[in-house]
Image (cartoon, helix red, strand yellow):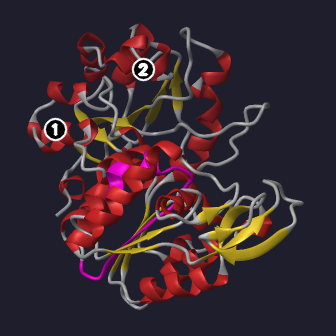
């Protein structure tokens, strides 16, 4: 049941925390508007009901107060275009102008506030700052999953100034939370987690948490070579975290004790240097010659991983299988993306979470062939590590 869908916003001013932290080029043109488009359904539902929308977001990491390159006014044209209505702008997120413009807002109108992070109080989770923001609207809607892991004023603290019935998740946040909960708490088995990326240290907590839930864990990317070295393999000059060899051994032991199958890439595409013009060859992942490094999973690993994925009913993917940004080393990541799309078509539920996996699934054209693509890299990672996210708790535990 969607609290947001059931709520009638007629005559209400909805204060919406969106995540408009999008990339701009040097001329302030938006180079990827995914995050803005993701918030559109929530805003449109409010306007259609006869409510008005006050949008607040952070943007970049301004160090010392207001700065031209971090102004949200650069997004005004695109937000207006996507919503099909002219969006007003307040040159501040609190203060007289913001208050007056919010007060004057009529049903069907939209106001975008200036960057929240122009105030240090935002990231400090300052209660006074949160209270000032809260006074701008009648209803609080959090639709910014990408910032749900931060206990900031606008994502967590602000919720305490609204009654239970007047605070809720937006459609994007509802989708993110229900997809993540489905995977973490009610996954249909076999449940395969595909974990990639460069470092074991970045993924220890997520692997440990998934050992309690998954039937299979596929490990790829640079982190796989730490596991091979821990098992006594020869990995040439592949990426390795020497201080994590015992951790890798420990994770393998825990998996065995819990009956979870860990799948490591049996073979690798190897290169003589980390570059697009490198000489390439292939080798078993535990016998990589000196002077060579593994930069992608090999063909045997692709076939083995595909089989595991196609046998799955639930799939979580976090992290690429190789250096997919370089054409010579993208085959493994593409092969995994394709297998997930096929498994989804066969009825599996698939969730793609984490920046690089999302980039990959978009790059290879499979985004609309999986069940859900998360917009929140860090937030999704912390959720699967088993941490409580302040932005979710502020509304769920109210």
Locate residue 172: give its quadrant: bottom left
Q: Residues within 10 Å of mark 2 (few under 14, many from 20)?
A: some
Which of these two is toward me, 53 or 373?
373
Q: Does 226 sit above or below residue 94? A: below
Give percent across and percent down for residue 224: 53, 62
> Is disc 1 surrounded by few (<14), some (14 to 19) or many (20+) residues within 10 Å?
some
Mark 2–mark 1 Cα distance, whole angstroms, equals 21 Å
Q: Residue at x 34, y 16 (%)?
A: 124
Quadrant showing the N terminus: bottom left
Residue at x-position 56% and y-position 42%: 79
Compared across the picture, whether 195 is left or right of 135 comes to: right
Residue indicated by mark 2: 101
Which residue in the protein does label 1 denote?
166
Indicate the quadrant containing the C terminus: top left, top right, bottom left or bottom right: top left
Where is residue 146? Give x, y as percent. Answer: 42, 43
Residue 70 placement, left or right of 40: right
Magenta residues, start to end: 188-207
Where, by quadrant of the figure, is residue 68 drawn?
Answer: top right
- Is residue 201 rendered magenta in the image? yes
Name above or below for residue 366 compared with residue 21: below
Is 377 colored magenta in this rendering?
no
* 160 sits to left or right of 293: left
> 118 and 10: which one is in front?
118
């Amino acid at each position: 049941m969607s609290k947001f869908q059931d709520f009638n916003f007629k005559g209400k001013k909805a204060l919406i925390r969106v995540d408009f932290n999008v990339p701009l080029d040097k001329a302030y043109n938006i180079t990827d508007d995914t995050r803005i488009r993701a918030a559109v359904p929530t805003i449109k539902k409010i306007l259609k009901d006869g409510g008005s929308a006050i949008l607040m977001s952070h943007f970049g990491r301004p160090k010392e107060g207001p700065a031209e390159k971090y102004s949200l006014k650069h997004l005004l044209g695109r937000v207006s275009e996507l919503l099909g209505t002219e969006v007003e702008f307040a040159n501040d997120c609190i203060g007289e102008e913001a208050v007056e413009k919010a007060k004057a807002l009529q049903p069907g109108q939209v106001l975008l506030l200036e960057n929240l992070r122009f105030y240090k109080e935002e990231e400090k989770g300052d209660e006074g700052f949160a209270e000032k923001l809260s006074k701008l609207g009648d209803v609080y809607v959090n639709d910014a999953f990408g910032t749900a892991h931060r206990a900031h004023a606008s994502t967590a603290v602000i919720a305490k100034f609204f009654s239970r019935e007047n605070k809720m998740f937006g459609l994007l946040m509802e989708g993110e939370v229900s997809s993540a909960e489905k995977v973490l708490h009610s996954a249909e088995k076999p449940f395969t987690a595909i974990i990639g990326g460069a470092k074991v240290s970045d993924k220890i907590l997520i692997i440990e948490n998934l050992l309690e839930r998954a039937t299979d864990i596929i490990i790829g990317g640079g982190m796989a070579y730490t596991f091979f070295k821990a098992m006594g393999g020869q990995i040439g000059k592949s990426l390795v975290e020497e201080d994590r060899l015992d951790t890798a051994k420990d994770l393998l032991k825990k998996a065995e004790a819990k009956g979870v199958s860990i799948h490591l890439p049996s073979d690798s595409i190897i290169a003589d240097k980390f570059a697009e013009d490198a000489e390439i060859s292939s080798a078993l992942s535990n016998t990589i010659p000196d002077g060579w490094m593994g930069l992608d999973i090999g063909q045997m690993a692709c076939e083995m991983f595909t089989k595991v994925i196609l046998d799955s009913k639930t799939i979580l993917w976090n992290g690429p299988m190789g250096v997919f940004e370089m054409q010579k080393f993208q085959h493994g990541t593409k092969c995994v993306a394709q297998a997930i799309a096929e498994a989804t078509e066969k009825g599996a539920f698939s969730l793609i979470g984490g920046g690089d996996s999302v980039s990959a699934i978009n790059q290879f054209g499979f985004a609309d062939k999986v069940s859900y693509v998360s917009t929140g890299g860090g937030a999704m990672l912390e959720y699967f590590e088993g941490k409580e996210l302040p932005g979710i708790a502020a509304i769920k535990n109210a």
